[in-house]
Every structure is written in structure tokens, then in C-alpha cells.
Image (tube, helix red, strand yellow):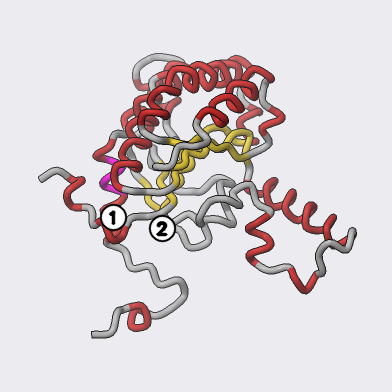
């Protein structure tokens, strides 16, 4: 039986976050450099977005480039930026066909000008698409996001636009990069590593974490379905007991 048929339509995660890990190891296994791995990851990205849209996920966020990634060799960073631009231009028609709206989070102003320009163009051209929101986390770090959030809220308190008593989870959510997205229900990380690497720390407070040994360039729809099936087989209690969350008979 096709794995997709095992997925229950009444329990689809609204927001899936993905740490796309393993490009370098995948390339090394083939005797190639890391850049070769990044170039061969596009199919995995396309398959993941399509699979998420097909099952009814509202939002998917891909950890494309972290604030720490700027420390990598300049050649690799430049290659990643070039790949980002080329991929956006090449995949625009696919995004439009599948009703995918592009969104970005992170310190986008630190990206090269041509990357910023391409991102803004694709975001604008896809802004009316309704099926799924694809968010690219670029030059993103969760701790930096939280620091910026605290600063922005503090400015409003100083300017008497907001009182300390008014600060609650909703206020904080509204000042995050992801203010227009639901909390993360499921986080997927490939390559066998089991950590969240400064990704959406606030938003993943109650997310289910799914780790797979599949290296990112080999990740396909069937692997995404595996993660969804695992998610649906877990009991999400949000601090309650099993008895509290079970429907009354």
C-alpha cells in the first residue's frame, strides 16, 4: 500500500519545519566536494514541498542558511547564494502551478544584493497563492530572533506604546519573524543528527521531533510520509494527561 494512503486527513500537522542536513556527507560519500551535495539537494526540496501541499499542510519552513553558516568557507557560501538565486528563478513556475506562497525569515539584509532582489521578486509574484506557505529561513538564528523581539518590545515599553503588564505570549508571537505562521507541529531533521541547532526555539515549544538517517539529497516524498505517519502515531498532550485529551465516550 502507498504510504500516503496511511495518512489520516483529520490529523495533519499545520506547520512542518525541516532541518535539511547531510549535503556535505552525501557528496563526500561520492568523492565530490560539498557544493556538489548542495546542488543535488533541489529534488529533495521540491519533493518535500509537493508532499506537504498534497496532504494539506498549511506551512512548511526550511532551514536554508543559518547565522552560523556565514562562518563556512567563502567559496561554499558564495556557491550557496548563487544556488539560492538560480533555484528561485528556476522553480518560480512550479511554485505558481502548485499555489505555493514564498515567505522568508531571518536577517535578509545580510544576504548579497542580488539574492535579496530575487527573493523580493519571488515573494511578490507568489503573494496571492493560497495552498501552502513555504518559508525559507535565511541568515536565521533563533536566539538572534528572540533578542530582536525583546529589543522591539522594549522600545515600545520605553515609548509608552505598550505596558509591561500587557506583555504575554501573544505579544511575543506578534514580534517574531514568524508572526504570520502557526506554531510548529512537527520538526524533521535528516542525516541522523539529533539536535535543533538554534532553529525556531520559541515556535517548537510543543513540536514533535522526528530524526531520520536519510541524508538530505536522498530525501523523497515517501520519507516525508514516514515522518507524518510517525507524527500521527504519537500522543500530543501539551502538558495534560492522556485521560484529559481522550474524547469522552
Q: Residue at x 43, y 35 (%)?
A: 100
In-front residue for pair 102/141: 102
Q: Pinpoint residue 217: horizontal percent, then vertical percent.
A: 36, 27
Q: 82 above or below 209?
A: above
Q: Is residue 180 left or right of residue 248?
A: right
**Residues under numbered marks 1 and 2 in contact, where contact means CB atoms less than 8 Å apart:** yes
Which region shows up in magenta?
A: 223-227
* Figure check: 58 above or below 86: below
Specify few, some or many for label 2: CA neighbours under 10 Å numbering under 14, 14-19, or 20 or more: many
**Which residue, given by chain and number where applicable, does mark 1 sit on?**
230
| Above or below for 13 versus 41 | below
User: In the rendering, at what x and y percent does residue 40 appear?
Assistant: 38, 20
Q: Report the residue that reaches farthest toward the front.
A: 128
> Image check: 10 left or right of 123?
left
Quadrant in which the C terminus appears: bottom left
Residue appearing at x 39%, y 39% in the figure: 190
Residue that mark 2 sits on: 208
Could you say whether the residue bearing mark 1 is in a helix, strand or loop?
A: helix
Amino acid at each position: 500500500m502507498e504510504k500516503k494512503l496511511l495518512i489520516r486527513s483529520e490529523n495533519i500537522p499545520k506547520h512542518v519545519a525541516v532541518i535539511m542536513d547531510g549535503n556535505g556527507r552525501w557528496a563526500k560519500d561520492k568523492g565530490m566536494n560539498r557544493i556538489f551535495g548542495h546542488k543535488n539537494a533541489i529534488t529533495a526540496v521540491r519533493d518535500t514541498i509537493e508532499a506537504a501541499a498534497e496532504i494539506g499542510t498549511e506551512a512548511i519552513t526550511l532551514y536554508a542558511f543559518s547565522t552560523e553558516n556565514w562562518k563556512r568557507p567563502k567559496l561554499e557560501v558564495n556557491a550557496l547564494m548563487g544556488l539560492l538565486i538560480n533555484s528561485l528563478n528556476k522553480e518560480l513556475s512550479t511554485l505558481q502551478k502548485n499555489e505555493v506562497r514564498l515567505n522568508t525569515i531571518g536577517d535578509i539584509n545580510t544576504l548579497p544584493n542580488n539574492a535579496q532582489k530575487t527573493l523580493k521578486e519571488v515573494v511578490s509574484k507568489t503573494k496571492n497563492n493560497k495552498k501552502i506557505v513555504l518559508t525559507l529561513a535565511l541568515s536565521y538564528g533563533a536566539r538572534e530572533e528572540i533578542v530582536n523581539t525583546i529589543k522591539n518590545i522594549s522600545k515600545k515599553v520605553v515609548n509608552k506604546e505598550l505596558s509591561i503588564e500587557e506583555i504575554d505570549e501573544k505579544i511575543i508571537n506578534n514580534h517574531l519573524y514568524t508572526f504570520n505562521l502557526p506554531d510548529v507541529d512537527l520538526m524533521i531533521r535528516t542525516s541522523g543528527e539529533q539536535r535543533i541547532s538554534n532553529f525556531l526555539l520559541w515556535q517548537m515549544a510543543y513540536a514533535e521531533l522526528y530524526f531520520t538517517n536519510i541524508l538530505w539529497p536522498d530525501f523523497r516524498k515517501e520519507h516525508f510520509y514516514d515522518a507524518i505517519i510517525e507524527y500521527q502515531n504519537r500522543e500530543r498532550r501539551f502538558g495534560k494527561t492522556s485521560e484529559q485529551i481522550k474524547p469522552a465516550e
